[in-house]
Image: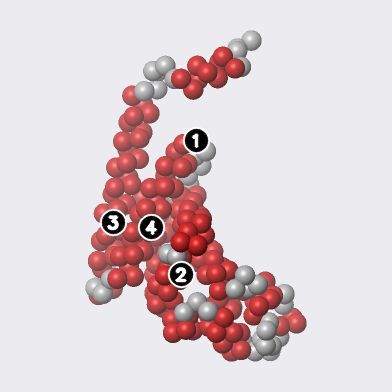
Amino acid sequence: MTTSTDRTPQEWQDDLIEGTMMHAAFDGWTWTAIERAASELGLPEGYARLVFPGGPLEAIEHMMRRADRMMLVELERRGGASMRIRERITAAVRIRLEQAIPHREAVRRALGVLALPQHAALSAKSLWRTADVIWRAAGDTATDYNYYTKRATLSAVYSSTLLAWIADSSEGFADTWAFLDRRIDNVMQFEKVKASLRNSTANLPSLTRFLGRLRYPAR
């Protein structure tokens, strides 16, 4: 049997978060939930505080990072690289939610914690990270303003779909997937509008380029 001394505290994080999600559905994101999960893993008393020294909030953040990693693995397994951009984005969002179905109550309780004003920064950072992971999985390499607009738009899509999923009582989450398809339509239309605007203004004078030439005149 693997013991705590065979692995570092960080190496226990994935296993401990899996157990914690089971208990968080009933005990909320508390030390009680974390320590019960640790006990079930055979970890010594107090060891959970070495695994997640930041407490329940750190555990929630790890849960979200882990969900991003798991999503990427499953997307690759389903042949995401051969999908069109729209399909990849839709599949990524759907996979992330499908993988969370066994722990929907734990996710709902985590959202309640992240909704508190003092946790707004972590909530925004985690949402942005998920949107970034999805866009990168879709092959996006933007570094200009498109980087920010794409992630801001997808953040809105993902967060609204997540809330729809939390409240969904339809069979097989059919209402959520229909909602997601409509929101992805909005994203694709927005990207088309941006591309059209870029093309129509490509030859117009640019204030940014003009100021750049003043600062760095051509030799």
At label 4, the amino acid type is Tyr
Dot 1 or dot 3: first in sequence order is 1
Left or right, 88 with reference to 172: right
- Label drawn at residue 181: 3
Q: Which residue is mark 1?
A: 144
All told, the count of numbered labels is 4
Q: Which residue is mark 2?
A: 113
Asked if residue 77 is positioned above or below residue 6 in the image, the reply reads: above
Residue at x-position 39% and y-position 18%:
203
Q: Position of residue 111 (x, y in %)?
A: 42, 68
Left or right, 124 with reference to 3: left
Dot 1 or dot 4: first in sequence order is 1
Quarter of the picture holding the N terminus = bottom right
At label 1, the amino acid type is Asp
Quarter of the picture holding the C terminus = top right
Dot 3 or dot 4: first in sequence order is 4
Alpha carbon distance from label 3 to label 2: 28 Å
The residue mark sitting in front, 2 or 4, is 2
Q: Position of residue 25 (x, y in %)?
A: 43, 81
Q: Which residue is mark 4?
A: 158
At label 2, the amino acid type is Val
